[in-house]
Amino acid sequence: MILVIDAINKDKHGAVLEDMFRLRARVFADRLGWDVQIRDGMEMDAFDALDPAYLVGLDEEDRVVSCVRLLQTTGPHMLSDIFSDILQGEPPMRAPTLWESTRFCVDTDRLSTQDRGHGSVARATSELMCGTLEFAQRSGISDIITVIDPVMNRVLKRSDNAPYGYVGNIVQMGKTKALAALLDTTDERINRLRAFAGIEGSVFVDEEALIARMARRAQPAPQKAAIAPDVLAQYCLEQLSAAQSEQDMNAALNLAQAVLGARQHDGTSPPQADIPYGTGYRH
């Protein structure tokens, strides 16, 4: 399921954002070898300070498995300021209804075998693409320009979500290459992608239910009430006094040795009690 995080609700999802930035570090720095900034195991850059919209994919245990970042093209964005080599000297495309999609990644190590989806495209990938298109459409965004690598370009084509055009040229970026592709947010594209992945119903998470689940997980586990040492000692003495057979006596002695011995070992036992010999079992 997809969680949308923006400037309005980001304070409610600090833990999710941290996990998202850690996923980005594993993918873009470790796997792809891009020259990105890593701090405390998280990948962040100057564009994350511009209050972009993030779409974060969560698995059934609410763990981050995918993410993407959306930025307006009317201000600073990666294609105009970082990946400008792709444009080969041409001015960047700018429009209020054209937004940039970057930092699309999926945690392939965390996906289950049941999540491999159709045609080797993971369901988490299709769900994130679908969520991105639907969020953009309902936000008045007609087109998305996305900086991707050739692998992601093939994924888009395999999932019946092929770009309708490309901008500039392919350039080297770390261990791989980068290119800029154009996607519209029409119903036709969304329906094709949903049909390919077999997605029915909403792909977006119930945010209030998610917040409640996360709050429950953050609560400390209830601690069992400690049994006072004198209560344990009294119980052992009662078992010894009540012994009616040699078997009962041996069991009571073993219990006393195990319980009181453990208390003495950790320094919490009361003064050693004498075993009453005037009551209970006799040899």
Image (spheres, rainbow, N blue to C red):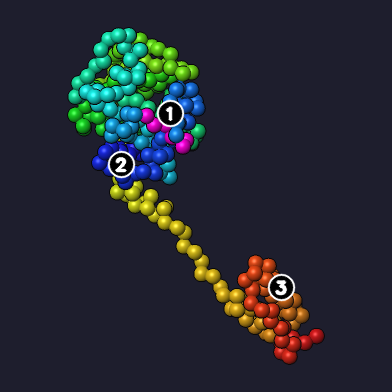
Q: In the image shown, does 196 or 77 lie closer to the viewer? A: 77
Write down the residue under mark 1.
37
Residue 206 lies, with reference to residue 153, above or below; the image says: below
In primary-sequence order, the first of circles 1 and 3 is: 1
Q: Which mark is residue 48?
A: none
Place of residue 191 in the rendered image (x, y in percent of width and height, measured from the top left): 28, 27
Place of residue 60 in the rendered image (x, y in percent of width and height, measured from the top left): 41, 43
Residue 111 lies, with reference to residue 236, above or below; the image says: above
For mark 1, give the secondary structure: loop
Write down the residue under mark 2.
10
Name of the residue lying farthest toward the bottom: 278
**Circle 1/circle 3 CB separation < 8 Å:** no
210 inside magenta stretch: no
The answer to whether 179 appears left or right of 174 in the picture is left
Q: In the image shown, does 51 or 60 lie closer to the viewer? A: 51
Q: Which residues are magenta?
A: 40-45
Residue drawn at x 34%, y 52% is 212
Q: How packed is label 3: few (under 14 Cα within 10 Å), some, or many (20 or more)?
A: few
Residue drawn at x 35%, y 17% is 83
> What amino acid type should be assigned to the residue bearing mark 2?
Lys
For mark 3, give the secondary structure: helix
**Circle 2/circle 1 CB separation < 8 Å:** no
42 inside magenta stretch: yes
In primary-sequence order, the first of circles 3 and 2 is: 2
